[in-house]
Amino acid sequence: MYGIDSVMLPQGLLFDKNTEEEDVLAAYGTPYFRSETEDTFRLYYQDQKNPYHNMDFYVMKPESRDTGVYPCVEIENFS
């Protein structure tokens, strides 16, 4: 998701700049990998049965939402 305001994802998650880390955790559970930068939380989910199926969320921290940096979600499904 680049250059759009929001996207509706499976599990009923409306992903946009106001999405909280807790929203992603509630929808998808504990991530395979989590990291943090100054502006974002990165939550990476990988299907353990097929490593080519994954979702990678970059969730904006509340204090960074108006900085011009945008949230991102990358979904890969290479079968």
Image (cartoon, helix red, strand yellow):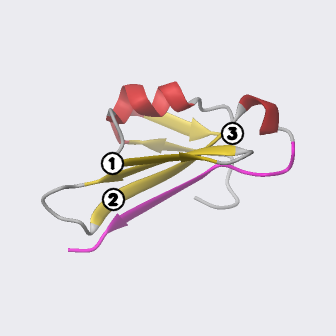
Q: In the depicted view, which residue is nearer to us: 13 or 72? A: 72
Q: CA distance from mark 1 to mark 2?
A: 10 Å
Q: Which residue is mark 2?
A: 54
Q: Earlier in the sequence, mark 3 or mark 1?
A: 3
- Among the two numbered marks 1 and 2 on one chain, the one whose residue lies closer to the N terminus: 1
Q: 10 Å neighbourhood of mark 1: few (<14), some, or many (≥20)?
A: few
What residue does disc 1 label?
A: 32
Residue at image x 67%, y 31%? 18
Numbered circle sitting on residue 17: 3
Residue 48 picture quarter: bottom left
The N terminus appears in which quarter of the rendering? bottom right
- Calculate the distance from the C-alpha at mark 3 to the C-alpha at mark 1: 22 Å
Q: Is residue 32 magenta?
A: no
Residue 45: give x, y in percent of width and height.
35, 50
State the SS at label 1. Answer: loop
For the residue pair 43 and 7, the one nearer the viewer reads as: 43
Residue found at the far left of this picture: 49
What residue sits 70% from the left and 60% below the top? 3
Cα–Cα gap, marks 2 and 3: 21 Å
Nearer the camera: disc 1 or disc 2: 1
